[in-house]
Amino acid sequence: MASKKFKPSAKSALPFKTDNREKRQKLHITRKKALDSTRRDERFRRRRAEDKDPSLREERLRKNIPLTLERKRVWDDVDRDTGDGLGVSVDVERLKRQKLEEEAHSDAENDRGQVLEAQSSEDDRDSMIDSASDSDEHTTAPPPPASSARKSATERATSPTQSTTSTNLDLTPSALAARFPTLFSTDPPHEPKTLITTSLNSTLHNEARLLTTLFPNSVYIPRSAHRHSHKYSVREIAAFATNRSYTAVLILKEDQKHPTGLTFVHLPKGPTFHFSISNFIAGKKLPGHGNPTTHTPELILNNFRTPLGLLTAHLFRTMFPPQPELQGRQVVTLHNQRDYIFLRRHRYIFREKRATEKNMIGADGQVVKGVEGIRAGLQELGPRFTMKLRRIDRGVQRGSGQEWEWRGKMEKQRTRFQL
């Protein structure tokens, strides 16, 4: 216990304790004030130094990057033969850069080999001319023994049996196209036409009608559940939609009168994507919301980096027409973060920058050139909700087999993500 005559300094850490509750409270308050004062002095000292030398502030801001889970993200160490698997967490863009570097290195080796071959052939020709002029006898010298043709560097480095799965290194997933030919068609994309329905005994009619305003060229057909009517299965609904030139079927699921899932069936033969949804909010419940129009929106897909993420992104790409109507100024954003897909719809407008606003900063931390005086205003239209991928079926429904399925303990390692 401290002595009564001892007066702790305002800057001290107060390492001692006391059994008296009131004194402990006073000591804690004194210690907190001392720490706050120390931090305040340090902050003002740093500001004075940065005002004198602005480079110190730039250096501090460059290093002051929050260490989030995204920055701690780990990738699987795989080779080209296994890099196209849906359960593999691998950065496709990074693998593409590696492929381009290897191709550039092989081309350089090939060019170097061709130059060396040309130089060696010229040296041999010069030596043959010199030997013929210096010889006193006119007899023809015997030809040199034929040497085996030297292979180029590319031929020596190329395996006779090339891997067929190495095409997944490109951002255009050719390996996935072989597994999902209906989703990755080489033909010109058709105009999307979506059939939206619900699960049996559903009450989410208003939410389903909201989805028709989100996905262009979509129509909502209620799913009958009367005891005297036929209860159509998903396979029968998919066959019905295929015969009427629909390109996709969307099924909205509910639990206790709240939407809990979305199922996307890509027609005519699949695959089928199952998502769980949460935080569904209609547009009219958003503060300061706008009213959507019938214009085809633009589509923004963010942070889909793995083969599974690219497959999911291509699914959403097929749900929207390739040519948006820019006069509507509507944009639908699907942002993937930590395997959660956040869907938002906004209307944007370009305006002049106000005097109190800062310049736009890019991903590299530098000011974006050319748009110093322009700002974009956003107005959310709704609906908004969050999705998470749970299962991918090879065809229609579970009986066709699973390509990928979320399992327990996949999130045990919090720095490893699937999308």
Image (cartoon, rainbow, N blue to C red):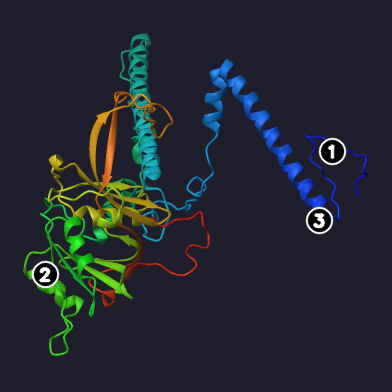
Closer mark to the observer between disc 1 and disc 3: 3
- Quadrant housing residue 153: top left
Mark seen at residue 8:
1
The Cα–Cα distance between marks 1 and 2, rounded to whole angstroms, is: 80 Å
Q: Nearer the viewer, residue 180 or 151?
A: 180
The Cα–Cα distance between marks 2 and 3, rounded to whole angstroms, is: 74 Å
> Mark 1 belongs to which amino acid?
Pro
The Cα–Cα distance between marks 1 and 3, rounded to whole angstroms, is: 18 Å
**Residue at the spot of label 2:** 241
Q: Horizontally, is 284 left or right of 110 in the view?
A: left
Within 10 angstroms of label 1, few (less than 14), some, or many (20 or more) residues?
A: few
Q: Horizontally, is 156 left or right of 252 in the view?
A: right
- Say whether marks 2 and 3 touch (CB < 8 Å): no
Identify the element where label 3 is drawn. helix
> Mark 3 belongs to which amino acid?
Arg
Q: Quadrant of the C terminus?
A: bottom left
Q: Nearer the viewer, residue 394 or 142?
A: 394
**Residue at the spot of label 3:** 21
